[in-house]
Image (cartoon, rainbow, N blue to C red):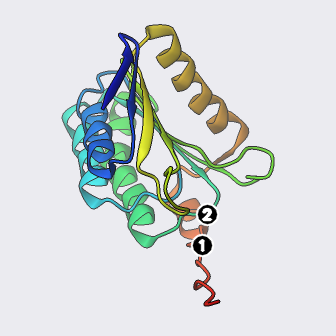
Amino acid sequence: MCKVDENVEIIRGNHIKLMEKQIEIVENAEKVLAITGSRTRNEKYMKTIESAIIKNPNLEYYRILLGMPHNEGLKSHLFNCLKIVEPIEKEKMKRYLFLGFYKDTKLESEKFICSNEKQALVILPSFERIMKYDSGIVFHDKNDVSRMVEYVKQLYIRGIDITLENSINKLKVYKHNKRREN
């Protein structure tokens, strides 16, 4: 990890450090958790999110899919979050779970963001090869972080609300083409 200044860190070429940072952000979320992306397949990361929601029933969780989910595990995670939050929302008469689907990735390309109210991680593609995400920029500046959370909320507002079991069921898991041999 490389610290650019007190407000910015860079993680370069280290998938493990990237996952550790995502989990740290989730575990330290007190008010809001704002996440984008449709490729998550790390079960520990998704279970950490679910645990954070259970431990802190006042936590607002925004999860925006930019395009179809890339695996069944992510879809299961969405169902799990719904089951956890539904009784809390009914009891408190307040919404805490915001699942969104942004369909048109030609207008707004897929981005990978993991943010709470204190820090935001933007995941970047690898510097070494395609279809690998092992680098990122971590923002600590209060204004940068709040803008990143607001960006995720805007994606939710402009997307399709999928915070219903029926809506999640309709999501088709993206089928990857097999690599061509040359």
- Evaluate whether residue 97 shows in this view: no
Q: What's the mark number on residue 68?
A: 2
Q: Position of residue 122 (x, y in %)?
A: 49, 35
| Residue designated by label 1 | 172
- Evaluate whether residue 17 shows in this view: yes
**Which sits in the foreground, 62 or 54?**
62
Q: Secondary structure at mark 1?
A: loop
Q: In the image, what residue type sits under mark 1?
A: Lys
**Which sits in the foreground, 168 or 129?**
129
Above or below — where is 26 with respect to 80?
Answer: above
The residue at the far right in this view is: 107
> Which residue lies at the image location 38% right of the left edge and 26% below the top edge?
116
Residues at circles 1 and 2 in contact by the CB criterion of under 8 Å: yes
Q: CA distance from mark 1 to mark 2?
A: 6 Å
Q: Position of residue 121 (x, y in %)?
A: 43, 32
**Which sits in the foreground, 59 or 8?**
8
Report the side of 64 relative to 82 (left or right).
Answer: right
From the image, which quarter does the C terminus lie in?
A: bottom right
Badge 1: residue crowd in 10 Å (few <14, some 14–19, many ≥20): some
Q: Position of residue 101 (x, y in %)?
A: 63, 51
Q: In the image, what residue type sits under mark 2?
A: Met
Q: What's the mark number on residue 93?
A: none
> Which residue lies at the image location 74% right of the left edge and 44% below the top edge?
108
Q: Secondary structure at mark 2?
A: loop
